[in-house]
Amino acid sequence: MKYPIRIHPVVDFSTLTEPQKRLAASMGPRGKRESSNAMRLLLRFPLSSAVLRGVGVTQDQYAMTMRLFQFTCLRTLWIYDCEYVWSRHRVTAVNDGIDDEDLLAVATGPSNSRLEGLDRVFADAADELHYDHRLSDETWSAISAYHPDAVGDVIGAYVQYVLMSTFCNSVGAVLEDDVEGYPAELKALSGKDTKPAGHTRRPATPGGYPMRLEPLDPVDYHRAQVSALKPLRNEKITGTKMMRTFIRFPRFVTAIAAPLMRLKDCALSARAVHVSGLRTAWLYGCETLWDQERSACLELGLSESDIFEVAVGPASTKLIPSDLLIVRAMDEFHNDGWLSDATWNEIVKFGEEAPLDLIGAHILGTLIATMANTLGVELEDGASGFSTELLALMEQDAGR
């Protein structure tokens, strides 16, 4: 799909504002005149781009090889139909021993007969996270056996490229002249449903997901875990069962910190941020995140009826327009990989950096939900989780 150009990359670096100059300097070689269109597009978002830097900052420390990383990110890019980033990765994939036959297999999806072993495991992980909201028992076991830190890394890689896809698609990033887009065989496949059979995006069943790892006691944290928590030391989330489980993967916690801190002071209202989290929790069937966001929304003035309507989704006739806009945006990111014209035009009214802040809100929810579901994080003591009415709505949605 060709996405409309909504923002153009920075061309004249002599016009950079002070925040843009600081961002360009922090990006190193990627913040130069000769850098890619995507990087020069990010310069249009000097404050909210902290979300991307936070999510991608740990990439060089991933436990998985670059080849395995490529399989996860390339499959994610294909699911989100991001030709821009896919094509740039196609160039680098050659250096990691991935040829065009492998790329066609990635685009074909789990039904392909070419990928084997860990190549298949890491490619299929993207489908499980997107369509099932968690890693399956088989994939969990294979990735954990490969390296104990790789589970957090593969979820981080998936979410990093959800972010890049939704950003590049929504702003309309255009391929550079020297980068070839989808070759003919991929163009023929583009737009076809490569979703694996049996994946229905069904939310969590009553009782949640099985626990795979227990929360750690803070007295047992090692140095890397303590360091990862420092940016969040004043946040309530640090003491939750969720974070005490996540901290087993310090790099993953580092990835969460940047969007969480940015969203405390962004172009969106606190209500918009937490409605986005609530809807993302629903889309991913994450009872733990739903309960946390429900509490935040109640404090911000939403009623229990409003919260139920967020679960109803874009079809709701009872949500106020601003809440309905955020709900619609979350569904567009998750289902379509970009913001429609109507939604984009409304979101930019919040401010120039609002689109990337909104993507950041979705990304934070996606990071937390997929990891919480995968690890089987239990509800906090005293939390109510999904109500009977919500469970009934889930069954209704699943049957559609």
Image (cartoon, rainbow, N blue to C red):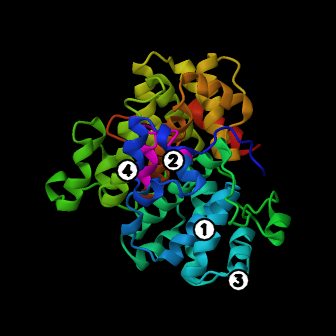
The residue tagged 2 is 366
Q: Residue at x 67, y 54 (%)?
A: 80
Residue 164: percent from left, percent from top: 56, 52
Q: Which mark is nearer the camera, 1 or 4?
A: 4
As for residue 44 lying within the magenta part, the answer is yes
The residue tagged 3 is 114
Q: Earlier in the sequence, mark 2 or mark 4?
A: 4
The residue tagged 1 is 89
- Rendered image: mark on residue 25: 4
| Measured Cα–Cα span from mark 1 to mark 3 | 20 Å
Instruction: Identify the secondary structure beneath mark 3.
Output: loop
- Rendered image: mark on residue 125: none
- Kind of residue sitting beneath label 4: Ala
- Kind of residue sitting beneath label 2: Thr
As for residue 309 lying within the magenta part, the answer is no
Report crowding for label 1: few under 14, some 14 to 19, many 20 or more residues within 10 A (C-alpha).
Answer: some
Instruction: Identify the secondary structure beneath mark 1.
Output: helix
